[in-house]
Amino acid sequence: MTKWLLIGAGGAAGSMLRYALAGLAQRLAGGSFPVGTLLVNVTGCLAIGFLGAALTGPYVIREEYRIALLVGLLGGYTTFSSFGWETLALLNDGQMARATANVLLCNGLGLAAVWLGYRLAERL
């Protein structure tokens, strides 16, 4: 139960952090390019790469705290970091075809799903 509460708390904190940072970056940059989202995705990927390696290697912490940070905080901050971490894991395992499929499917199907959801909502 503690693990679930820590994940929930981390997710809430990550979501608030994403909202604040992405909004601030977008206001500072101006324009229509989603700079805030780009910043969140890149910093989330940097953080999951660093913490994923550090917290299972030289700085091992209890599993529930590691999961709270990686799944909760960073999952609430950006799921793009999980996508990057899982794709890297496939590459590190020598599974180039699966890593490529993951990139193409996540992006292609994700964009198609956004389009479909948008079109469905228009019809309502």
Image: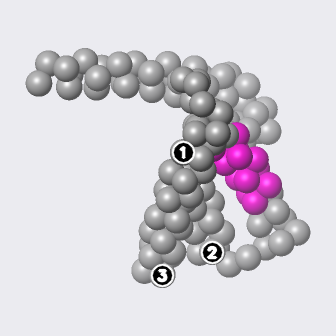
C-alpha separation, residue under disc 1 versus residue under disc 2: 28 Å
Q: Residue at x 48, y 81 (%)?
A: 2
Query: What amino acid is at disc 2?
Result: Tyr
| Quadrant position of residue 71 | bottom right
- Please check the rendered image and state whether residue 114 is part of the magenta-colored stretch, yes or no: no
Q: Is residue 14 left or right of residue 112?
A: right
Q: Is residue 30 above or below residue 120?
A: below
Q: Quick one: label 2, few (<14), some, or many (20+) residues within 10 Å?
A: some
What range is drawn magenta here? 40-52
Name the residue carrying label 1: 23
Q: Residue at x 50, y 59 (%)?
A: 16
From the top left corner, tell me how far across and down residue 6 is, in percent. 51, 74
Which mark is drawn over residue 65?
2
Q: Is residue 57 above or below residue 121?
A: below
Mark 3 element type: helix
| Quadrant position of residue 56 | bottom right
Query: What amino acid is at disc 3?
Result: Thr
- Determine the main secondary structure of the stretch shown in magenta: helix
In terms of sequence position, does the residue under pointer 2 or pointer 3 come before the other?
3
Q: Is residue 118 above or below residue 8?
A: above
Mark 1 element type: helix
Q: Quick one: label 1, few (<14), some, or many (20+) residues within 10 Å?
A: some
Name the residue furthest right. Answer: 58
Q: Is residue 9 above or below residue 73?
A: below
Name the residue carrying label 3: 2
C-alpha separation, residue under disc 2 versus residue under disc 3: 10 Å
Q: Quick one: label 3, few (<14), some, or many (20+) residues within 10 Å?
A: few
From the top left corner, tell me how far across and down residue 60 is, in percent. 79, 73
Quadrant of image for the N terminus? bottom left
From the top left corner, tell me how far across and down residue 118 is, in percent. 29, 23
Quadrant of image for the C terminus? top left
**Most foreground residue, 45 or 105:** 45
